[in-house]
Amino acid sequence: MAMQESGEMYLETIHVLSRTNPTVRAIDVSEHMGYSKPSVSRAMGILKESGMITVDADGAIRLTDAGRERAEQIYERHTVFTRIFKAIGVDDQTAEDDACRIEHYISDTTFEAIKNYLKEHGQD
């Protein structure tokens, strides 16, 4: 499924927050991303309609299997690129920022080749 960068960012944020919070709500996403509550609410509606999340009666947001799979893919890209950039001497904040940009645009083919290269050279 093709998804815009903003949708991927929301999925990744929900994934990251769910790793440390027992319940993720729209306000948590809003605070983490620095976005307004109406913007987050609209995005949650779109993600819900696309089958990426569910929202229960108490407002708890959960990733569906499809949403979790996509979120984990984006998060993996983010962590791999951040680690590479730091390893070559990029400062922490720039490494995070650049990884966040690249993770949405690189093809699956190229990313898999990078992962294979790292694995073959003992860098995984």
Image: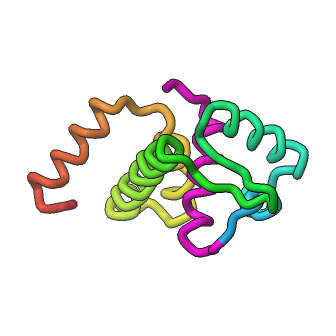
Above or below, comparing residue 10 to residue 91 in the picture = above
Residue 30 appears in the figure: no
In the rendered image, residue 20 lying in the magenta stretch gets the answer: yes
Viewer-proximal residue among 47 and 3: 47
Q: Position of residue 41 (x, y in %)?
A: 83, 45
Query: Quadrant of residue 17 in the image?
Result: bottom right
Q: Main secondary structure of the magenta part?
A: helix
Q: Residue at x 57, y 51 (%)?
A: 63
Query: Quadrant of residue 94 in the image?
Result: bottom right
Number of callouts: 0
Q: Position of residue 88 (x, y in %)?
A: 33, 59
Which residue ends up furthest to the left in the rendered image? 120
Above or below, comparing residue 113 to residue 119 in the picture = above
Q: Residue at x 52, y 24 (%)?
A: 2
Q: Position of residue 106 (x, y in %)?
A: 41, 33
Which residue ends up furthest to the top in the rendered image? 2
Viewer-proximal residue among 15 and 80: 15
Q: Residue at x 51, y 66 (%)?
A: 92
Report the side of 91 relative to 55 (left or right): left
Report the side of 113 relative to 72 (left or right): left
Q: Which residues are magenta?
A: 1-22
Residue 33 appears in the figure: yes
In the rendered image, residue 33 lying in the magenta stretch gets the answer: no
Above or below, comparing residue 98 to residue 60 in the picture = above
Report the side of 115 relative to 98 (left or right): left
Q: Position of residue 117 (x, y in %)?
A: 16, 46
Above or below, comparing residue 4 to residue 56 in the picture = above
Which residue ends up furthest to the front in the rendered image? 57
